[in-house]
Structures are given as C-alpha cells and as structure tokens.
Amino acid sequence: MANLKEIRNRIASVSSTMQITSAMKMVSAAKLKKAQDAITAMRPYSDKLTELLQSLSASLDGDAGSKYADNREVNKVLVVAITSNRGLCGAFNTNILKQCAVLKETYSEKQIDFVAIGKKANDALGKKDTVLTNHSNVYDDLTFDNVAEIAESLMQRFVEGDYDKIELVYNKFKNAATQIVMSEQFLPIVPMEGDTSGASDYIFEPSKPEIVAQLIPKSLKTQLYKAIRDSFASEHGARMTAMHKATDNATELRDQLKLTYNKARQAAITNEILEIVGGAEALNN
C-alpha cells in the first residue's frame, strides 16, 4: 500500500503542476494578443522610417548626420542583449545568450562590452563579461519615452567615441511558435545599398540636412523601441508555447501514473483475495 500512496502523491503533484502551466499558458496568450498587435502596427512605420533615413543619409554631400554614420575602425564593440526578466519560456533567453557568445568569438580581438535589457541577460552575462548597465525595469512601463532614454545613452556613447560599433541582439517575433534571433547593427547607421537617386524626387522644407539631422535620432530611438517590442511579443509567444507543451507532457504523465496506480491497486486487491481464499481453505482442512 506504501507504493500506492507514493503514486497517489505523484499524481497529485503532477496535477497541481499541470494547473499552474495551464494558467500560465492562458495568461501569456492574453498578453501575447496585445503585444502582437503593438509590434504588428509599429513595424511598417519603423521599417519605412529606417529606409527613408538610409536613403537620405546616403545621398547627403555634407556632414549632416555624419556623427551617427561615422564608420571608423572597430576596436570597441557594445552589444545590447535584449532578453526577458523571467524564465519558463523555452529557449527564448538561451538563444540570445548563444548569439552573444558568437559575437564575442567574432570580436575576440576587440574590446566587447554589454548593455543588458532584461534580468536574464544581466544575470548570465554579468558572470563573465562586462555589463555596463541593466535596464530590466523598462518592462515595468514599456513606452517609447522610456526606451528613448536608453537609445540616447547608446547614441552618446557612440558619438563620444566610447564605442566604434553598437549591435542589438534580440528575438524577432514571427508567430507564437517561431522567434528569429536577430543581430542588428544599431550604430553606425547602415547606408542603403543600391541606387539612392530616388531621394532627389522629394522637395525638402527645411533643407535636407536639417531634416536628416532631426530624423536620425528619432529613427534610432524607434529602431530600439521596435527591437524591444519584438522581443516582448516573442517572449509571450515563447512562454505560451512552452507552457502548452509542459501542460501536454504533464497530462500524459498523469495518465500514465493513473494507469500504473490502477494496475498496482488491482494487483493488491487480487493478492488480498488470494490470501482470504487461502486462509479459508486452510481452516476447512
């Protein structure tokens, strides 16, 4: 009977875990809808703004915006690792840390430091690497203004020459089950490839250099905000998928334990019947 009691305890434990994972799945599904709508609505604007700025910057003859497009020799690299504050979301955070390791190998002969956006990145990278700042609190109130402050600090580090290149590493949201790990150059600005003569079709008021000088900082802030929004939606998608799989596994394990329990209980009852029959025959003899 002790064995039966142990199996009953395991069934109760698995059932409790299954309820927790199922609840977490529903919570992530609800949050995912809002996060997905936000990044889906923002992405076309961000992509078009980036395309416009790249086109205008490439066609400029003067020095307007050049402080953000200064392609100098790369000796110091800053990587912005965007993860989540919590786990239980499959390989979501692990994939970012793996990509950071790839960048460390790529720039093995350079100085490479990190800025963490998310507690998981700060905890993991802080053990072996230099993490300048941790902005895990940005998820408490994920607004453009809060992200703009982070972008401004990154832009200042680049302009002042603290770093020659800044890269963003994040998960791009594709759907609830798929997240694509992105390594995206933040600074210097990547010029548009190909023919940029189309920019001359526009009439600029005020001048083109003035417009570019004003729009480049806004474009960079939008780029970082989009990356964090992408990561935020990907996190909930990854967690929903992970909790769905965990719930399915818990259900399967619970069913197996119930089957094992019923078999063990049936065997125990059969043994008791045999003992009773054997005792009765012994008395009759």
Image (cartoon, rainbow, N blue to C red):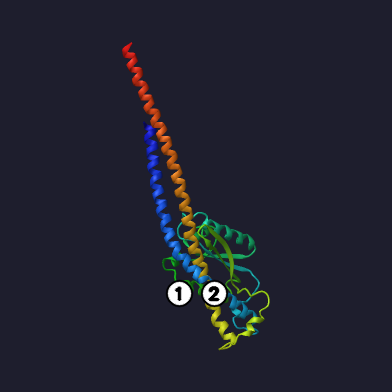
**Residue at the limit of the structure toward the right, as seen here:** 194
The outermost residue toward the top is 285
Residue 180 image point, x, y percent: 56, 61
| Other-residue count near label 1 (Cα within 10 Å), few / some / many at <14 / 14–19 / ≥20 | few
Near-viewer residue (182 or 126): 182
**Residue wearing tag 1:** 145
In the picture as drawn, the residue positioned furthest to the left comes out as: 283
Q: CA distance from mark 2 to mark 1?
A: 13 Å
Q: Amino acid at mark 2?
A: Leu
Label 1: state its secondary structure. Answer: helix
Tell which of 174 and 110 is nearer to you.
174
Which mark, by number, is residue 72?
Answer: none
Which residue is under mark 2? 220
Q: Position of residue 26 (x, y in %)?
A: 41, 56
Amino acid marked by disc 1? Asp
Q: Residue at x 50, y 59 (%)?
A: 176
Image side of residue 212 versus residue 119, left or right: right
Residue 65: x and y in percent read 59, 81
Sequence-first tag of 2 and 1: 1
Q: Residue at x 59, y 85 (%)?
A: 209
